[in-house]
Image: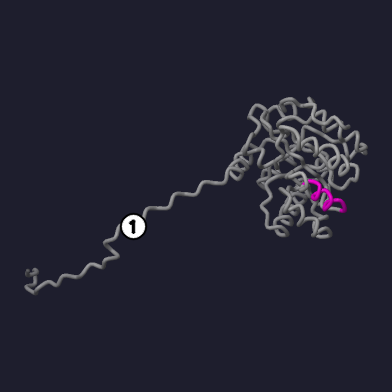
Amino acid sequence: QASGGGATARRTPVRAAATRALPPARPRRAAHPTTAALRRFERLHLPVYCGGPRRYVAFTFDDGPGVYTRLAVRVLHRFHVPATFFLVGRNLRPWRGALRAETRAGELGDHTWTHPYLPALARRAIAAQLADTKRAIARLTGRRVALFRPPYGARDGAVDAAARRLGLIEVLWNVDSADSLGASYAQIVRNVRAGLHPGAIVLMHENRGQTIRALRYYILPALHRSHLQPVTVARMLALDPPSLAQLSAGANGCRGSGRGVGLLRNG
């Protein structure tokens, strides 16, 4: 077959690779349910006080790591209870071993660097308290930090804005053990019993002997025999999150708040 110039045109062999169909695009991997739940709550910008009405409860511990942390973790492990630990930044390096134990035992959250009353600080100082702690936890543990609890539960618009900019979900509570106020182990048990119901987020402090005693001999054995399922806060948000109406109502939106379920009779 002649070309326009009279020369015989040579057929160029087509490489086999060029004739193959392109492989189908890999489907985008769906986010893990817990990760997806955290992203949803990050976008809502509303503090979490409790979960939904099913059977999940979350035990949370503030102010660690510290002297009682390893003991607290051993007690939790004995009863197969995952927990959420809100950590103070300045405690991380002095208690590296305890921090590793907490990393294995549950979930880690930001509780500021020095545990100040945040509303009394300038905006820049608030941001530094949160950002420095979040960064240090991630650096020392390799864990992504998504949760934040303001010391004393004290928050205002500036605190909320700082948490929002850092992608942190504010987690408060609806059951206060009062261990940080000096409650005895028996009082701690009574306080937890009064509010332990599906969706409860329980506030405790790991570095108090009376808290460890209440957990070990009364609260966790009874919980182990109950229908309630302990989970971390992030898992609660994935498995049975609070509704938008609950979130909008704040602490008043917690279903069954203040009602016990008759589980802990030894206090």
Question: Which secondary structure, mark 1?
Answer: loop
Most prominent secondary structure in the magenta stretch?
helix
Quadrant the N terminus occupies: bottom left
Counting from the top left corner in percent of width and height, residue 146 is at 67, 47
Front residue of 102/64: it is 102
User: Residue 83, image x and y in percent?
Assistant: 74, 44
Q: State whether residue 113 appears in this view.
A: yes
- Residue 261 in percent (x, y) is at 77, 26
Q: Tell me: residue 66, above or below residue 191.
A: below
The quarter of the image holding the C terminus is top right
Between 58 and 151, the one nearer to me in the picture: 58
Magenta residue span? 67-76
> 237 left or right of 261?
left
In the image, residue 240 lies at what x, y percent? 64, 34
Q: Residue at x 80, y 44 (%)?
A: 61
Q: Is residue 83 visible?
A: no
Above or below, comparing residue 160 to residue 28 in the picture: above
* Residue furthest out toward the front: 225
Which amino acid type is shown beneath numbered disc 1?
A: Leu
The residue that label 1 is drawn on is: 22
Most foreground residue, 84 or 18: 84
